[in-house]
Amino acid sequence: MRSLIDILELTTQEIDELIDKANDIIANPAKYSEKCRGKKLATLFFEPSTRTRLSFEAAMYELGGNVLGFSEAQSSSSAKGESVADTIRTVSCYADIIAMRHPKEGAPLVATMKSRVPIINAGDGGHNHPTQTLTDLLTIKRKKGRLNNFTIGFCGDLKFGRTVHSLIGALSRYENIKIILISPDELRVPEYIKEEVLDKKNIEYREVSSLDEVMPELDILYMTRVQKERFFNEADYLRLKDSYILTPEKLFSAKADLSILHPLPRVNEISVAVDDDPRACYFDQVLNGKYVRMALIMKLLGVR
Ligand code: CP
């Protein structure tokens, strides 16, 4: 039985196969409409979500399967003090596969130790978000036609932004990726990512605080929200939340074929005036997320 907690549990070949499968689903959706008939997905969301939960649910419905679960801890017995371990032992009696989001780093990993069915990490605290990474990779592949030979700028909250941590890990496997980390000093990428991924894999990267300064170099700009829910001190959040606001004017110096990604939700960091720019890809990401999760559900359930 296979779960997915960290994107690095998948080999590069497996990631490429998932992307190919998602592209085939996009081209031939009818071929997949009965693949999970009789199977049940449980979505256990102890933390809010729009895209991840609903795309998992839409994915399972489009595969002909069914969905059960909860969208907030308060509507489960977690509110009465039940442990994650007991919740998982219970739900794995009812479902064939579980997608779980939790505010505590490592909670989905603990869940795998108690579950009788595959667990998919749908985001654990400020740690990882592997299915967002699959979404991002599919989007990059569809936009650029490749997953190598580009310069990507990650901008915003690189400390708490779990989608950034997972995507850096995945991209470190591909050739000639240059990374520019754009953030205020307080929101830099954690040291463990630099030491265990960037340095270990000899990835070319640098840390800067100015987006304007590096904009002309970028093939991909990955914007992120400042993660209010992870701050201990509201004053710090208020001081840092509008560190970067992408506007049409800021894109004057960008490449004509730049791809602008954002995992969403956004707050202020991308002006809505950018949405009509052909370089904006963040709503493509939303749609791609459903297809790549269909591919992942099939893989973990062993559906051919
Ligand atoms: N990108 C993402 O994880 O969005 P949600 O928090 O809405 O699921």
Image: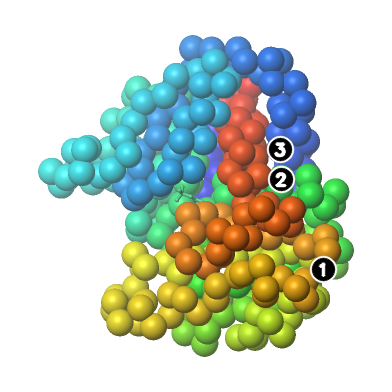
Cα gap from disc 3 to disc 1, whole angstroms: 29 Å
Camera-near label (3 vs 1) is 1
Cα gap from disc 1 to disc 2, whole angstroms: 21 Å
Q: Mark 3: which amino acid?
A: Leu
- Say what secondary structure mark 2 lies in: helix
Residue ID at (34%, 65%) = 229
Image coordinates for residue 117, horizontal then vertical, percent: 45, 30
Q: Nearer the viewer, residue 278 or 284?
A: 278
The residue at which mark 3 appears reads as 18
Q: Which mark is residue 87?
A: none
| Mark before the other along the chain sequence, 3 or 1 | 3
Position of the C terminus by quadrant: top right
Image coordinates for residue 51, horizontal then vertical, percent: 49, 43
Q: Is residue 164 above or below residue 147?
A: below
Q: Is mark 3 within 8 Å of ligand 1?
A: no
Q: Is residue 192 above or below residue 224?
A: below
Position of the N terminus by quadrant: top right
The residue at which mark 1 appears reads as 255
Image coordinates for residue 11, horizontal then vertical, percent: 72, 48
- Say what secondary structure mark 1 lies in: loop
Give the crowd class for mark 1: few <14, some 14-19, many >=20 residues within 10 Å.
some
Q: Nearer the viewer, residue 54 or 260?
A: 260
Image coordinates for residue 284, horizontal then vertical, percent: 66, 44
Residue ID at (49%, 59%) = 266
The residue at which mark 2 appears reads as 138
Mark 1 and mark 2 in contact? Answer it, CB < 8 Å: no
